[in-house]
Image (cartoon, helix red, strand yellow):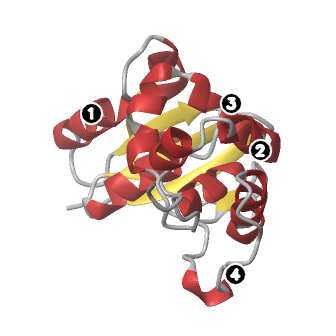
Amino acid sequence: MSAPLSISPQTRVGELLDAYPHLEDVLIRQAPAFKALKNPVLRRTVARVATLEKAAQVGGIPVRDLVAALRQAAGLGTGETVAEGGTASAPSVLGPQDPLPAWVCEGEVRVTIDAEAMLTGGEVPLPHVQRALQEAEAGQLVKILTRFHPAPLIEAVERGGHRTCVIQTGPDSFHTYVCRSR
């Protein structure tokens, strides 16, 4: 018999749900944004690469609390501690009244991508975002509309050297601006 999957901030959501399918409901109870895991496209794509640390960022909850709740529900206790300094800080999300960075200008938006509609239609938004960034000129923006903080998508475009800014415009409404790097 193999040892149970360790649940830590670095555990991938897909691995967690493969090992402990009943934890899907626990994730959803932790944050409504996790309802998106019921979408088969997200389940096959994002859940395979996103860690619990990124999921906590998306859900707007402390990673320590998420890991503890999942470990408890899996019958593993909460014995493992999550080091406070061992996690990346969540990217800041601006509110509608917060001042925007100078580079965020609606006039520079080349294309707006409704990622929510794509996910509902069974499409993965990241390739569309990457293609839009390739077609944009340096300094132009791609605007992405979602019902959740798209931490894995942000991480992917930032690895490409692009700047991002996330604005929460409502309880289930986020606008992410990505500026094409030079």
Residue 98 percent across, percent down from the top left = 74, 59
Residue 168 seen in the figure: yes
Q: Secondary structure at mark 2?
A: loop
Q: Residue furthest front?
A: 1
Q: Earlier in the sequence, mark 1 or mark 4?
A: 4
Amino acid tagged 2? Ala
Q: Nearer the viewer, residue 108 or 159?
A: 159
Q: Nearer the viewer, mark 4 or mark 3?
A: 4
* SS for dot 3: helix
Which residue does the numbered mark 3 point to in the structure image?
Answer: 35
Three-letter residue code for mark 1:
Pro
- What is the three-letter code of the residue carrying label 3? Lys
Specify the label residue 127 is tagged with. 1
Q: Quadrant of the N terminus?
A: bottom left
Question: What kind of residue is marked 4?
Answer: Thr
Q: Position of residue 73 (x, y in %)?
A: 77, 51
Q: x, y percentage for residue 57?
A: 63, 58
Please say if 115 is above or below 53.
Answer: above
SS at badge 1: helix
Question: Mark number for residue 81?
Answer: 4
Going from the N terminus, do you reach mark 3 or mark 1 first? 3
Residue, disc 2: 31
> Along the polypeptide, which appears first: circle 2 or circle 4?
2
